[in-house]
Image: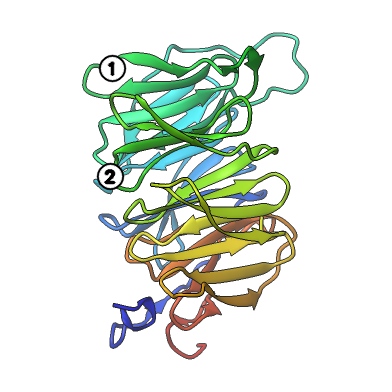
Amino acid sequence: MPLLFAFHGSPMIHVKGSFTHEGEVGKTFFSKRHSVLISNGEDEKLRIWSFPEGKQVACIESLCLDHVVVFNDGDSLAWSCLEGIYLSKISNLKEKVLLTPKRSPPKDVVEIKPIITGMSVSPRGDFIAYVDAYSGLHMISLASRTIVTVDSGKKNGVFGEIKVVRFSSNGPLLAYSNAINEVELRTGTELKRVRTIGNLSDRIRHLSFSHDDKYISVSLDSKATKVYDVLSGKEVCSFQDFVIGEFSPVAHVLAIANNKGRLRIIDMTKVRVQEQEFSLSWKSVNSISWQPDGRVIQIGSNSRRIRFFDSVSRKEILKHSVGGDEQ
């Protein structure tokens, strides 16, 4: 079913709150189970908001709180800070379990930087892959609580910084940026090498799989987003000046954004890729995410509040109805 008609006749949603951080908004996630939105930001706070009311219902503050992942069960979440990676429940944030060896803040350091630079959870919620800035890519088994090293960050005798890791939508693959700016694909649990995509000649900023794992989008520091066929490794299309891209969880639709307030929706199902572009307002974009039903897009940017965009009506939504007229 085409995405445009998937929500025909569905009730309108009224977004009421401002969903505001004290600095730039980082990543956002939606829990369908609890009807809440989870976000982190430059203010080093993890906030949980009721949706669509926009009321903050919980908040965690921790030094270098930089990455958050939400499990498919809609209740579990993991978040990283200077101490390591914690596992907790949206329904009970006070109870938390440290999954990695505890670290203490370094002494006599003027600027403390995050140690965990990337994190992803498997679709079944049994593994967490994470990138340690000093020791490479690792994977935690949540059943045994054991940690294995996937890639130390050394490639062909060259040490490089691994920054990005992402499980595929259905779990058979793990993708990450290796030391020489290739996208390396491995099997999700056995960690056997499948293939590499690249060399991309620039640092990789973000990875996203389509809902059926047919495509992977690769966003680069050089302000370009490229889409590849996962099976063949061949480039399908490329978008210059767009710094981040994220596939819909339900369709071959890609949302990409640039640092000039532009959001573009790409339909990959057509013989020729069809694009629609929309002008919003931000100076830098940090993240794009979709709600689980593929209707609402959330955007984290320098504007300090989470931005919402309706993929059906093709309008930004704030304090007005999704799919309807402004209130």
Quadrant of res 65: top right
Q: CA distance from mark 1 to mark 2?
A: 19 Å
Say if 57 sits above or below 13 in the image. above
Residue kind at label 1, given as amino acid type: Arg
Question: Looking at the image, which residue is at 50% across and 67% down?
Answer: 17
Q: Badge 2 local density, few (<14 within 10 Å), some, or many (20+)?
A: some
Residue 298: x and y in percent read: 50, 62
Residue 13: x and y in percent read: 38, 77
Say if 50 sits above or below 320 in the image. above
Residue kind at label 2, given as amino acid type: Asp
Task: Tell me the SS state at disc 1.
Answer: loop
Residue occupied by mark 1: 145
Residue 78: x and y in percent read: 39, 34
Residue 70: x and y in percent read: 36, 43
Residue 48 in sight: no
In the current view of this chain or complex, which residue is farthest to the right? 110
In the current view of this chain or complex, which residue is farthest to the bottom? 325
* Horizontal side, residue 210 vs residue 159: left or right: left
Q: Badge 1 local density, few (<14 within 10 Å), some, or many (20+)?
A: few
Residue occupied by mark 2: 75
Q: State the quadrant of the N terminus.
A: bottom left
Residue sitting nearer the eye, 198 or 47 = 198
Of marks 1 and 2, which one's residue comes earlier in the chain?
2
Residue sitting nearer the eye, 286 or 136 = 136
In the current view of this chain or complex, which residue is farthest to the left? 143
Quadrant of res 241: bottom right
Task: Tell me the SS state at disc 2.
Answer: loop
